[in-house]
Image (spheres, rainbow, N blue to C red):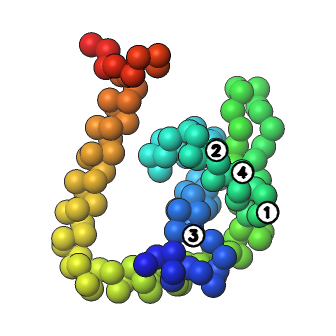
Amino acid sequence: MYDIALQDSGIRSTQLTILVGIAKNQPVPIGALGDVLIIDPTTLTRSLRLLEKQGLIAISGRSTMRQRFLSITRKGERILARSLPAWRKIHKHFLSTVGSRYWTDLRHELEKVAHIAVADSKKLTPRTGKLSS
């Protein structure tokens, strides 16, 4: 639904989410963006490489703290400005269909589940995949 609405802008809803996250917090360390968006590092890295290849973001070299920072390019700003009205329109339609209250409650529940999953994944032993005590 959202991806179809964004087709003319040339990006998908997942890419829009990342662009918004960068634009709101730039320059933002890659790890911090992953934490905010609750995206695993592998998926985030793959998405960032594509956005960089498209010229929508810039990824810095490693800083003295061994972090890499993200910023949105002028092209990324234009794509973002073109995408947001379409996203807002489809989101308004979505809310009118499912109900604003229902969506708010569901979003809060999904955020709880995501935070639990992230916390539990940090307890997993890398080799065995078992939860540590």
Q: Where is residue 39 in the image (x, y as percent from the top left)?
A: 49, 46
Q: Are marks 2 and 4 in contact (CB under 8 Å)?
A: yes
Point out the frontmost of discs 2 and 1: 2
Q: How far apart are marks 3 and 4 (CA)?
A: 15 Å
Residue at x 39% of width, y 22% of height:
129
Residue named by callout 3: 12
Q: Which of 47 and 128 is in front in this view?
A: 128
Q: Earlier in the sequence, mark 3 or mark 4?
A: 3
Q: Distance between the residues labelled 2 and 4?
A: 6 Å
Element type where label 2 sits in the image: helix
55 relative to 70, above or below? below
Point out the frontmost of discs 1 and 3: 3
Residue named by callout 4: 49
Under mark 1, the amino acid is Gly
Residue named by callout 1: 55
Q: Earlier in the sequence, mark 1 or mark 4?
A: 4
Element type where label 1 sits in the image: loop
Residue named by callout 2: 45
Q: How far apart are marks 2 and 1 (CA)?
A: 15 Å
Q: Which of marks 3 and 2 is nearer the N terminus?
A: 3
Element type where label 3 sits in the image: loop
Q: Position of residue 37 (x, y in %)?
A: 47, 50
> Where is residue 101, by image quadrant?
bottom left
> Where is residue 107, by image quadrant?
bottom left
